[in-house]
Image: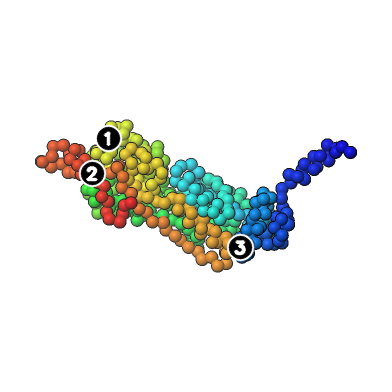
Amino acid sequence: MPIRPTARKARRRTKTAAATIHDVAARAGVSVATVSRVLNGKELVREETSKQVRAAAKSLRYVPNVAARSLSIRRSQTIGVVLPDVHGEFFSEVIRGIDLAARAEGYHILVSGSHSDPVQMLEVVDAMRGRVDGLVVMAPDVTLAPLEELRARDMPVVLLNSSGPNRDAITIDNYGGARVMMRHLHGLGHTRIAFVRGPQHNADARERLRGYRHAMRGIAATSLRALECSGDFTEESGFAAGRRMAASAPPPTAIFAANDSMAVGVLASLAAAGIKVPDAMTVVGFDDIPIARYVAPPLTTMRVDIAEVGRRAFALLLDAVIDPMAHVTRHDRVATTLVVRGSCMALQPITRLSTQPHRAARGRKSGSPNKGEAS
């Protein structure tokens, strides 16, 4: 008797139906509970049994039902990441660090930008509620009031580059890093050191500015404000600042930009003005974003292991997600490291013995940072 088309289709569907956990259990000759324990890695199972179950799952091409698993453990295996922006090398590196750490633990991430707007930040957090097990929130431009509102969202939160009372947080040693950079520049003979500030309401920018001003009090004979220039952490603002600094009288001998993106803009503006770096002017930055080593000349900067910041944020969040009752609130600070490259040089004073200061300066190029400060 010929098989009707509908019966043939039904048989084809049966042959290609996805394997279930019951199929794996039957193939391995164990209980469904044992299969669940092996695949979730939650309880000890004999090695022989574990290999048997995994082999059965592989042969059946079994894919775990994530939704069912989430219901059973009451977790989504997903975390939310809220950043001021998702554009730029710094944010990309943060996301990369979080994602690599999350994947290693079987988690996925949802990423969104708040555009440094407290209202949008809270809207994004509410949109993720119920979809994620916890949040990593970078909010260096946001005051403590909106951050405290996160408490009402009733989920674990780790703050990046901002902190609040009784909140898990990962911050960067911005103040200490700025002091180290200033000590390095002063050691090279620079006293007219200009500074390109970051956004006024950004916590990182404020701490880096504080480190610069503290160091300059014992260095500069002129007003600090005359050597400061506004910026917003973008290449464009660095370009504009470099142009203004190059036209000042007298110009600075070194420019310290509060982040690498602005330092890249400064380098471009000085090149456009025909000012050679580092022969005529030294330029340094902060963060050590990936492009910093490839610009011309390669940028001297304060290294922040940005991906490590993301990894540590995820580890701290996972600790709170897995065992909230035993979790102890922590505030970790990530250290910075001076990285000396070709964009800075020792300042060579003009003497009666030297009528060509730039050539003499090139003979004294700096490449030997203070011990323990460079990598």
Q: Which of marks 2 and 3 is in front?
A: 3
Compare residues 175 and 17 and report the one nearer the observer. 17
Q: Residue at x 63, y 64 (%)?
A: 45
Which residue is the site of mark 1?
275
On the image, the x and y values in percent for residue 138 come to 49, 51
Q: Is residue 359 left or right of residue 17?
A: left
Query: Looking at the picture, which amino acid does disc 2 mark?
Result: Lys
Q: Quadrant of residue 42?
A: bottom right
SS label for mark 3: helix
Number of other residues with Cα within 10 Å of mark 3, as a class: few under 14, some 14 to 19, many 20 or more: few
Q: In this view, does 234 lie above or below 98?
A: above
Q: Residue at x 36, y 39 (%)?
A: 295
The circle drawn on residue 81 is: none
Question: Marks 1 and 3, how far apart in space?
Answer: 68 Å
Which residue is the site of mark 3?
47
On the image, the x and y values in percent for residue 123 come to 58, 49
